[in-house]
Image (cartoon, rainbow, N blue to C red):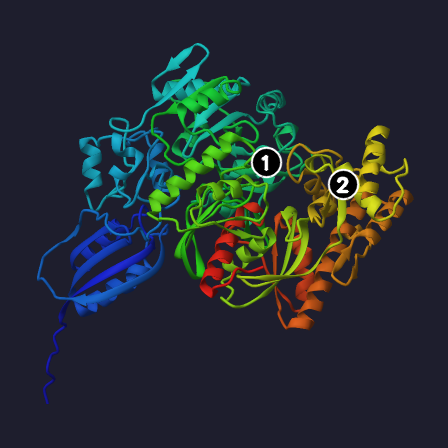
Amino acid sequence: MSTLAVSDPTLRHRIRVAGVVQGVGFRPFVHRLATELGLAGCVGNDTEGVFVEVEGAATLLESFEVRLVRDAPALAQIRHVRSTTIPAREEQGFAIVESHAQGAVRTSVAPDVAVCGDCLAELLDPDDRRFRYPFINCTNCGPRFTITTTLPYDRPNTTMRGFALCDECAREYHDPTNRRFHAQPVACADCGPRLWFEGPTGTVDEAGAALAAAQEALTGGGIVAVKGLGGYHLACDATSAAAVDELRRRKDRPHKPLAVMVRDLDGARRLAFTDEHESSLLLSAQAPIVLLHRRPDSPLAPNVAPLSPHVGVVLPYTPLHHLLFRSVPAHPGPVPDVLVMTSGNLSDEPLCYEDEDARRRLGGIADAWLVHDRPIHVPCDDSVVRAQGGQELPIRRSRGYAPLPVRLPFEAVPVLATGGELKNTFCLATGREAWMSQHIGDMGSVETLSAFERSTRQFADVHGVEVRRLVADLHPGYQTRRWAQQQAVQGVELVQHHHAHIAAVMVEHAVGVDERVIGFAFDGTGYGTDAAIWGGEVLLAGYGAFERLAHLRYVLMPGGDSTVRRPYRSALAHLFAAGIPWTGDLAPVRTATAEERAVVERQLQRGLYCVRSSSMGRLFDAVSSLLGVRHTVSYEAQAAIELETMAAAHLDEARRYRFEVRGDEIDAAPVLCSLVADRRRGHPVGAMAAGFHLALARVVGDVADRIRADTGIDQVALSGGVFQNILLVDLVRTELSARRLQTLTHRAVPPNDGGLALGQVAVASHRALRGHDGS
């Protein structure tokens, strides 16, 4: 019996790929894959992502669609692939076709990416035509978000549109076998951006000489403003205490740790201890600043990160950075070993990214300038992360991560959430996509408000979203709320601060649309529904509404913001509330003058110019001052950070303390009484700091266990700036695990107010979905 051969039919599929698929080399990848399989058709960008039409034998089409997802470029984030069969055309060949800009934008801009290994090898190869070219890039690396003016992502829609390709770059751009095939920022020294140096003696135009001049200025103790991917940095020699002191004086940043950049991973290991996960973060395409434990023999000047065992380290992520750490062949001279590389701004102002503005605002800080002429459309500061238990904890989500979307568990109408007042980011959402902005900063200046307004416009324009709903924090004094109210046509949706914090964690962990969690929201300040200042909150929270089940006992706080800057005043307030006399042997009592103590005491007795506060952040401040760790601060959470540092080194000696829970109040008075008694007995400060952390972790476990018994809910979400404290998070996780409770912590957005806008979007969208206005 003979077997009849069955032919493999020729089919044509129309495929749509959605997600982060523009600016990541996806079209060249599709072209190579189709060509390898002998398929005909085309691929292109449009406002929804990437469209593909592919024709060939059915078995080959099946293989193509499997590999389309499996072998996609590393930088791509595919949300979904939809394939339909259409009539075959019997055409030959496969092509990248012109992009289509029509309809609503439903795709995402890719973040900027650190220079790849291939480009770095070419940068350092004397035989390569891009040898030492400071702006080398390819489809796998380089600027994306910061140069994109609109979508689809094509050269005319970027700030590279003013740089016409030379013949050689054009050949590479159009060659499907080349790594720069359709790389939109592609350029070389003949046709691309140029670098120059401006110093006290004039301008140096040649790139090599400019780099040598910058190296000479840096190694000579000078401060150089360096224009990078998303804005300016201020750089100086990180091994020179004098240079660091001068930078701090000019920038008005007396104590806050400064980030440093070092040539390579070996250099980073000379500065700090790094485990495998921390090393992978340093070497990642995102190239964030990673907070590492500093080595005792580190060559860093002590004033880079005073009173901190940690240092923020970043590796070079642009070709220009790499060249700064390497000798210039024609200009031998000293080369920096490790540089302070801090944001180019004055304290409490936004990042400088436009050349004229940078010269105006940084002119009193920088001695010299290393500048290029590639325009930056969107400013984007460095990201900051910590490694925790083999996972990444974002502290500041910006370059390398923004504007990647976070997937919502339900549909959102086009909405803009304005975030908080400190560490501001905003969030633009539509459908299931929530695009978190880059770090904007603290909203305390006209400059930052202007940066916020400009960035919201840029975001809406690039993503093609016409905002129908504005969301803001409940606090009536927030600039972001006032701005939203000024812009709104139909009112502003207000979301309570700590509800937003917990909702953000819920989104990250894809908690179900109508599920609830036990939420602990610990931070410094958040406006409560009773007009008090909250910050030590235990919520039973869903997306649309919450119940406040418990909170840190209210304490009267005198003087508002002045107490935030002076932790000893917070300590006086907590001692007063606990009924502990202000005796002269207590550190915060000694720190305050007699006149100040008298004023504060009258305020507390009469409730004058005081606010009721359940803030956990202020409790950390109080304990830090009570133990003599920190009485005044020059940056946010300084007292708490130093207390964590002290505690982490003395866990084995920890004293035992206990909070008291009465009804819905968590009372710190018993802990404070024990701390005072131990201080008088001369117990080590580190042991007391560790005991405080352990006591707080235990009360979190106890309260969560009680709520689980009442509700059956076993998911516990932790959010708020206090949970940047990885010692506390580890201790809380241990307590919850022992009680068989599941811990949800942040991994995509920060636990501080930099993640607030994501939660605001989730709350407002759920309310719209369910038709109610929440709590």
Give how far across and how far down residue 79 sits, in percent: 36, 59
| Quarter of the image that includes the N terminus | bottom left
- Tell me the quarter of the image containing the C terminus: bottom right
Q: Position of residue 178 (x, y in %)?
A: 23, 43
Amino acid type shown at disc 1:
Leu
- Residue 715 in the image: state x and y as whole percent: 60, 66
Report the number of discs: 2
Q: Quadrant of residue 168?
A: top left
In this view, the residue in front, 111 or 422, is 422
Q: Is residue 14 left or right of residue 670?
A: left
In terms of depth relative to the viewer, which is nearer, 241 or 595?
595
Residue 207 on image: x %, y %: 35, 22
SS at mark 2?
A: helix
Q: Which residue is mark 1?
A: 271
The answer to whether residue 390 is seen in the rendering is: no
Q: Secondary structure at mark 1?
A: helix
Label 2 neighbourhood size at 10 Å, few (<14), some (14-19), many (20+)?
A: many
Q: Is residue 375 above or below residue 743?
A: above
Kindly check if marks 2 and 1 are in contact, taking CB atoms under 8 A apart as contact. Answer: no
> Residue 259, relative to residue 529: is it above or below?
above
